[in-house]
Image (cartoon, rainbow, N blue to C red):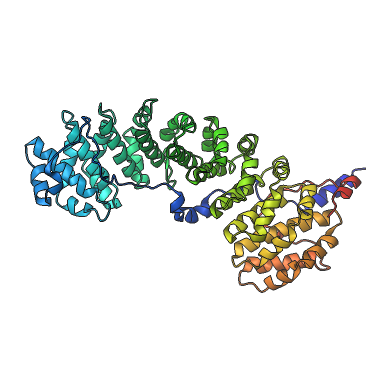
């Protein structure tokens, strides 16, 4: 009696993929370079505080009038080194205005003339908030420059003084300190961690109140996002996770800039291991992030989608949180977005969902995401085609026999085989792995000949034969193995050459009824 079960076990083990389940989902590592290039869709690391036509009001609520706009550099230096605070204020304001020029601000020249230590000193003048304000503004613009220029500000001990100004009774002074700290944190992981070490995060969070002005709140949230940014190394999670409840509240804000930077912060916090993703999920942001996938403003949509995409790189339960919040319906719409980087990111996100379990894959199918993925394979730009190919191959790896049959019935073979002519060998490998999974499933159900003929009819076999001469060793060996296993009278699959990009066992049911259901 045990013979049938033994046979069934042997047949299943023939198609078992050896990679671990958690390796199926792809983190952002391979996309990192490309994402760094997408400057238009990312928020600025640093920002200069540019002077506008109407001079802003000082901390006392009035415009500071002075002959500062006509002062030379020499006069500025003499004024800043004077013991007369009126001259100090005029000179510091003139210095700030020079550094606020829209084009070619003389940051390096003013550093060389020694203005930084004087500006840092003026930060302590609590009895003169106007001077504190102008000094903080000047330092903000110095810190907006190169890393070396930012370092000068730090070396003159500006950090603890700027952080102390977060407690200033003057909102303008506090806001200017926030801006300066945002520029310092945006310079890189080291300066970011310095700001965190001085306990800036709790003070920044305390500044976000119901009566905080929109402009002030924008600067605070932008600085928060820079404190969460960078992952080589990432910020100490204990230091930044305290922002999660505030970020959750900010996702209900109506201001687009505040929404965008809140989403950027969450996208950074979710770009990591499952423990960090879980902390973000537990903060209650998932439903709001998913709702923002319907946002028409691309500056908000981009980071919201990135955060959602990062969450589904996590565990099945974390992925389910996105699915249960209605994420699949929004992702389907984004596959048809007019901006290619949005469709690419949506396809990448879906590829991590199809790397999940059969129930999650079925929900992808039920949400109608396969036809737009196939459409991308047919006519999308190449970067998006790559992500769609991953989505399909991951589905073939973790899906049931019936799900693979449905995929073939929907017409995936033609555009999938066309990608065998891609110039990038990694994409060719992904496609061949997907085709191998489909052929393995067909062989299991005694449908190999029919599916092999279908692939041959759409030009797949000719392309595989050409790939036997490919310059990449993995490609030509895999092509030779596929032809030997599925398009000739060979003696079965060489397990050493099994698909490398797939890693889940197909769930076969070899009863008579299921074979009838497996109808290519």
The answer to whether residue 237 of the structure is visible from this angle is yes
Residue 48 in the image, given as x and y percentages of width and height: 30, 47
Q: Which residue lies furthest to the front in this view?
A: 54
The quarter of the picture where residue 430 lies is bottom right
Which residue occupies 76% across, 66% down?
Answer: 458
Q: Report how many numbered discs are placed on residues in the image.
A: 0
Which residue occupies 18% across, 54% down?
Answer: 109
**Position above or below: 468 against 313:** below
**Position above or below: 429 against 353:** below
Residue 357 in the image, given as x and y percentages of width and height: 70, 42
Which residue occupies 60% across, 68% down?
Answer: 423
The answer to whether residue 17 of the structure is visible from this angle is no
Residue 266 in the image, given as x and y percentages of width and height: 48, 38
Which residue occupies 29% across, 44% down?
Answer: 49
Q: Which residue lies furthest to the right in this view?
A: 1
Quarter of the figure that contains the N terminus? top right
Residue 382 in the image, given as x and y percentages of width and height: 59, 61
**Position above or below: 199 against 479:** above
Q: State left or right for residue 497 relative to residue 145.
A: right
Quarter of the figure that contains the C terminus? bottom right
């Amino acid at each position: 009696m045990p013979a049938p079960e033994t046979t069934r076990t042997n047949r299943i083990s023939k198609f078992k993929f050896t990679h671990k389940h958690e390796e199926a989902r792809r983190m952002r590592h391979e996309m990192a370079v490309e994402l760094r290039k997408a400057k238009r869709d990312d928020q600025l690391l640093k920002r200069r505080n540019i002077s506008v036509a109407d001079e802003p009001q000082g901390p006392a609520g009035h415009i500071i009038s002075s002959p500062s706009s006509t002062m030379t550099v020499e006069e500025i230096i003499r004024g800043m080194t004077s013991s007369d605070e009126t001259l100090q204020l005029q000179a510091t304001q003139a210095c700030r205005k020079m550094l606020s020029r829209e084009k070619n601000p003389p940051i390096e020249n003013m550093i060389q003339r020694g203005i930084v230590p004087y500006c840092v000193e003026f930060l302590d003048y609590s009895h003169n908030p106007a001077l504190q304000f102008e000094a903080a503004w000047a330092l903000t613009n110095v810190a907006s420059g190169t890393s070396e220029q930012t370092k000068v500000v730090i070396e003159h001990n500006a950090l603890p003084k700027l952080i102390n100004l977060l407690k200033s009774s003057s909102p303008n002074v506090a806001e200017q300190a926030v801006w300066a700290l945002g520029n310092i944190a945006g310079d890189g992981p080291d300066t970011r961690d310095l700001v965190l070490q001085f306990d800036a995060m709790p003070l920044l969070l305390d500044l976000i109140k119901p009566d905080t002005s929109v402009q002030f709140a924008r600067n605070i949230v932008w600085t928060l996002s820079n404190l969460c940014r960078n992952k080589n190394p990432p910020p100490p999670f204990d230091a930044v996770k305290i922002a999660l409840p505030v970020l959750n509240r900010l996702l209900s804000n109506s201001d687009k800039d505040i929404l965008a930077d809140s989403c950027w912060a969450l996208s950074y916090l979710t770009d990591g291991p499952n423990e960090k993703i879980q902390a973000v999920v537990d903060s209650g942001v998932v439903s709001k992030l998913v709702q923002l996938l319907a946002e028409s403003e691309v500056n908000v949509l981009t980071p919201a989608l990135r955060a959602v995409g990062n969450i589904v790189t996590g565990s099945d339960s974390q992925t389910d949180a996105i699915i249960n919040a209605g994420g699949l319906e929004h992702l389907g719409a984004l596959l048809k977005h007019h901006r290619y980087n949005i469709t690419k990111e949506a396809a990448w996100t879906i590829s991590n969902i199809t790397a999940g379990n059969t129930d999650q894959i079925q929900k992808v199918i039920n949400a109608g995401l396969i036809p737009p993925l196939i459409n991308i394979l047919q006519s999308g730009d190449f970067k998006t085609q790559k992500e769609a190919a991953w989505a399909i191959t991951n589905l073939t790896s973790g899906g049931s026999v019936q799900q693979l049959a449905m995929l073939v019935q929907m017409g995936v073979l033609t555009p999938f085989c066309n990608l065998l002519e891609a110039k990038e060998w990694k994409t060719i490998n992904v496609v061949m792995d997907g085709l191998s999974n489909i052929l393995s499933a067909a062989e299991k159900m005694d449908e190999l000949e029919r599916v092999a003929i279908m692939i041959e009819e759409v030009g797949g076999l000719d392309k595989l034969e050409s790939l036997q001469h490919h310059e990449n060793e993995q490609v030509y060996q895999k092509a030779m193995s596929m032809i030997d296993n599925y398009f000739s009278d060979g003696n079965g699959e060489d397990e050493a050459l099994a698909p490398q990009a797939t890693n889940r066992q197909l769930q076969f049911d070899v009863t008579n009824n299921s074979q009838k259901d497996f109808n290519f």
